[in-house]
Amino acid sequence: MEKKPFVTLEQVKEIAKTYPTPFHIYDEKGIRENAEKLKKAFSWNKGFREYFAVKATPNPFLINILKEYGFGVDCSSMTELVMAEKMGFGSDQMTDGIMFSSNATPAEEFVYARKLGAIINLDDFTMVDFLEKTAGLPEKVCCRYNPGGEFKISTTIMDNPGDAKYGMTKDQMIEAYKILMSKGVKEFGIHAFLASNTVTNEYYPTLARELFELAVELKEKTGANITFINLSGGIGIPYTPDKEPNDIMVIGEGVKKVFDEVLVPTGLGDVALYTELGRFMMGPYGALVTQAIHEKHIYKEYIGCDACAANLMRPAMYGAYHHITVLGKENEPCDHKYDVTGSLCENNDKFAIDRMLPKIDMGDYLFIHDTGAHGFAMGYNYNGKLRSAELLLKEDGSVQMIRRAETISDYLATFDFCDIFKGVE
Ligand SMILES: *Cc1c(COP(=O)(O)O)cnc(C)c1O
């Protein structure tokens, strides 16, 4: 699939007059159409709800768009809980608006999550006791499952749950349910996240079968009242142009088939399905726009940008591919080979290595695709680099700033007890 930017060079030139590069920009229209489609794909399930994984794109303006579709949020830290509360996802404003899927959880976070009426998803068997002692047990509890071994779709290994720190074993799930029931818990959920960024329509149906069968077994062995199953995140996006995007309608149909086959005949046809998608909801609808400000000719050809890994860490951290379009040169031949770099004093600060692109001239704007999830969010301040602004391209074509760029005084804010930095702008 050809990757097309959702803004033109002319638009970016106009935007850059007000908001200098680099910036992350998000496409409201894309976000809405996708959210609509997800709802439609699972509309056959009465209790279906998406809990957007806040960590993917923790911006209240974007999350508010998703809120319009009735989605909740998936939080995993105190800060995310506080944000969720301020955005109106707490129990006094929205029933079951927050899923708290954390691990190695500090006591005060359980206390706060309980205060907000969040659905608590226990990552470990020992957390049963910990939750009871620190925050008390709610009436509804979810437990996170880890089947161990490899997670395969037919013969392809998708990921390695056996090496993952998350979740509990099946025996522990059974034991946890029994203990929780004996202590008065009335409603149960099952959660698992077994493979990340899957670009296949088979992931959810395969995961669903595993979790639905587990639900049947848990019900048989414990008698627990299982009311929801959380398929979590993991539906991926095609970062490379050669990949076909997932078809959420096909995925929804695939899950329905397994639901009808496994859950309906065992009396579990009322189970609600939840998702905690992050990447799929936002990834393709965000981009990092940066300007080429230097070129360098040594043993390789380098293009130096005004953005760096502090704005987008995935290439440096995972060697992740992010497609790059040189705006205004969409139709020119990709006959130049470049390393596209940031300015960190770190040699892994490269957005692309040996990438074939059109000839880049100084001042060209590069559109780095698919940064809408786990992009800005992973930003950091190494080398004193500042995080960029976030902008929203609205459906009417106008642009709204939804987060301002950091300033040096933001960077220095944690020294606000020192006199020497007073007055720094
Ligand atoms: C990160 C995460 C998600 C979202 O994952 P995506 O790959 O962005 O869909 C969902 N649930 C949990 C518990 C997570 O840690």
Image: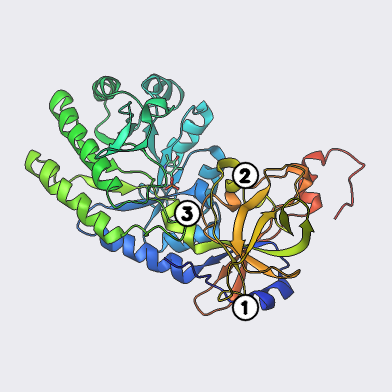
Query: How many numbered marks are there?
Result: 3
**Marks 1 and 2, the one that precedes in the sequence:** 1
Q: Position of residue 349 (x, y in %)?
A: 68, 47
The reply to whether dot 1 and dot 2 touch (C-beta < 8 Å) is no
Alpha carbons under labels 3 and 1: distance apart: 34 Å
- What residue do we see at 55% from left, 42% from top? 318
Query: What residue would you read off at disc 1?
Result: 11
Alpha carbons under labels 2 and 3: distance apart: 35 Å
The residue under label 1 is which amino acid type? Answer: Gln
Residue 284 higher or lower than 221, as above or below: below
Q: Position of residue 373 (x, y in %)?
A: 51, 53
Kindly report which numbered mark, 3 or 1, lies closer to the viewer in this rendering: 1
Using a 10 Å C-alpha cutoff, classify the residue at mark 2 as few (fewer than 14 neighbours), some (14 to 19) or many (20 or more).
some
State left or right for residue 206 relative to residue 77.
Answer: left
Kindly report which numbered mark, 2 or 3, lies closer to the viewer in this rendering: 2
Which secondary structure lies at badge 3?
loop
The residue under label 3 is which amino acid type? Answer: Gly
Which secondary structure lies at badge 2?
helix
The residue under label 2 is which amino acid type? Answer: Ala
**Marks 3 and 1, the one that precedes in the sequence:** 1
State left or right for residue 182 relative to residue 425.
Answer: left
The reply to whether dot 3 and dot 1 touch (C-beta < 8 Å) is no
Query: What residue would you read off at disc 3?
Result: 88
Residue 14 higher or lower than 290, as above or below: below
**Marks 2 and 3, the one that precedes in the sequence:** 3
* Disc marking residue 316: 2
Which secondary structure lies at badge 1?
helix
